Amino acid sequence: MGVAVTNTFAAAAGALDVTLQKRSGESQSDGQGFSLDVRFLLSPGLTVLFGASGAGKTTILDCIAGLQKPDSGRVAVGATSLFASSMRIDVPTRERHVGYLFQTLALFPHMTGRQNIEYGLASLTSDERARRVTEVAESFAIAQVLERRPSQASGGERQRIALARALVTRPRALLLDEPMTALDAVTKSKIIDDLRRWMVAHAIPVLYVTHDREEVFALGDRLLVLEAGRVVADGTPHEVMGRPQYESVAQLAGFENILDCEVVAPHPEQGTMTCKVTGSENTLEAPLTRLAAGTSVRLGIRAGDILVSAVQPVGLSARNVMPGRIKTINRRDVTVIAKVDCGIQLEVHLTPGASEALALEAGKPIWLVVKTYSCHVLQR
Amino acid sequence: MILQAMFLTLRLAAVVSAILLAVALPLGYWLASSRWRGRFLVEALVALPIVLPPTVLGFYVLTAVGPMSPIGRWYHSVTGASLAFTFRGLVIGSVLYSLPFAVQPAAAAFAAVDRKLLDASATLGASGWRTFRHVVLPLSLPGVLTGFVLSFAHTLGEFGVVLMIGGNIPGATQTVSILIYDQVQALNYAVANQTAFLLLTLCFVLLAVLYGLRRKGGWGLWGWR
């Protein structure tokens, strides 16, 4: 058990300062003992908390919101302490002003969208309430569903109502517990766009919990990786991916090759865009996005998606064919891992059989083939 | 005669179910949300009238409120009257006897409300009372209504406890079920038949309305179900 340490940076305006230790007899899923020991400081902006289920993500959110009590630690927003075991401070949930969007949304089923959103505004005059509701309904494009019950709204609309309900109270911080799991990518990205726009006007720390790695890249200004109750990595998604020493980071990475690029030329007629890899002369053809030329973009390529050829291949549909040289080649279990230099460094995974058939060894010149659709655009 | 007994019975049922509604809301909510280790003892106590012979319950209540008991003496010193063999005595016995029918459906409904809704309410700044009033209670209304109707119907048909505590005083303690018994004893089958049929019809209509309301939609009473 650690002693609560006061963070000297905690006074930073509106920052969410969290230090938590919590032991629980039984874990939700596997029945094993579980201990949480984390410490982080979130400045206003969006931080993604990534971890497998059972890593303690929800417990952290619950402790911040006051729905669960940590054994020791401190939770503060700016200079306001919400919980401090050393000073016996434990502000009840209803007085914490921390917005919480649950995985199940927890909309009140017997109330209309408007009544749901107004619920947290009981202390305001009815004029002020109406004004706030109108404002937030506009921000999240839900004016047309305000008079419907949640059961009569679509999944995306319910999501927006729940988000509006949490934000209309002007919380000090916002916690989101895997809120978008059930939504398709397009709906999801539109809602995230609206949330980001809202955050420009209201600078509060937002902690977004997910176990979906696509979301990590789409969202994260900052990424915290949680593994067995501890934060094992903290940084921008790119920094964290660069150090995949932990299992969950490696799993999160999924893309062994992550390349910072710049869009050089979109080709709408071909459905591709040419991207130049930063710090090299190499270009890659990636699937077309709405990004304009000159925008920076991050591409992820799975090592197992890269084809190796001993001779220059011809007549392929793949748009990316690059000559290179094997730098190192090692076998790990049933995977052969080759590091290839083709102007950029790429990691390639092959089966031992394929490696043997091509007689691959360090120093050997080869050709790499990457399909356009194997280049995943990771950041907007 | 029938009308007098019927009126008395309805009055008793109305008073008892109203009192039980007031008791069932806090007690049911406490049973649904308490984490006290001894809660099961209270649950067993509440369920007791279901299995106990009415005569046993009636006997204890009679003893408790009788003129020799502390309660009876205190009541006599305050009001100058006795509780035994009076309408008020009947109310006390009936409240105890119908307690589980009001409390159990309410407690079950409270417990069935998604805990996340309570958490959401708290994060939105609502007090415990506001959460109960605006979230728990509206969502538990079918269960609370069930408790109310069941305790009403159960009190209508009660016999043993009434006989033990109230005796058989027309206009004061003679309920419909006692009247039927009385008429059968007197071989007055026609009156017994009419009274029995009246009670049967009344109870059936009450339960039909209740279960109709409990359906999804419930004649538009709760649109969210």
Image (cartoon, coloured by chain):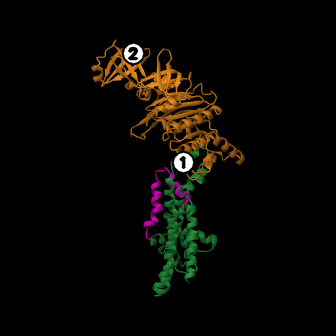
Chain colours: A orange, B green
The residues colored magenta run: B24-53
Please tell me whether residue A183 is drawn above or below residue A281 in the rendered image.
below
Residue A81 x %, y %: 60, 34
SS class, disc 2: strand
Proximity of marks 1 and 2: CB atoms separated by less than 8 Å: no
> Dot 1: few (<14), some (14–19), or many (≥20) neighbours within 10 Å?
many
Whole-percent x, y for residue B94 in the image: 52, 70
In this view, the residue in front, A129 or A366, is A366
The answer to which image quadrant residue A290 occupies is top right
Q: Which chain does tag 2 point to?
A: A
Does residue A359 appear left or right of residue B210 in this picture?
left
**Magenta stretch containing residue B209, yes or no?**
no
Q: Principal SS element in the magenta part?
A: helix
Query: Where does the image place residue A79, in percent across and percent down from the top left?
Result: 63, 31
Amino acid at circle 1: Leu
Q: Nearer the viewer, residue A291 or B152?
A: A291
Residue, disc 1: B117
Residue A120 vertical position relative to residue A225 in the rendered view, above or below: below
- Given the image, what chain letter belongs to the residue carrying mark 1? B
Question: In the figure, A217 relative to B165: above or below?
Answer: above
What residue is shown with label 2?
A323
Taking the spot 41% from the left edge, 15% from the top edge, the residue there is A342
> Marks 1 and 2, Cα distance to the nearest angstrom?
59 Å
Residue at left offset 62%, top offset 27%: A12
Label 1 secondary element: helix
Which quarter of the rendered picture does the C terminus of chain A lie within?
Answer: top right
Q: Position of residue A358 (x, y in %)?
A: 29, 18
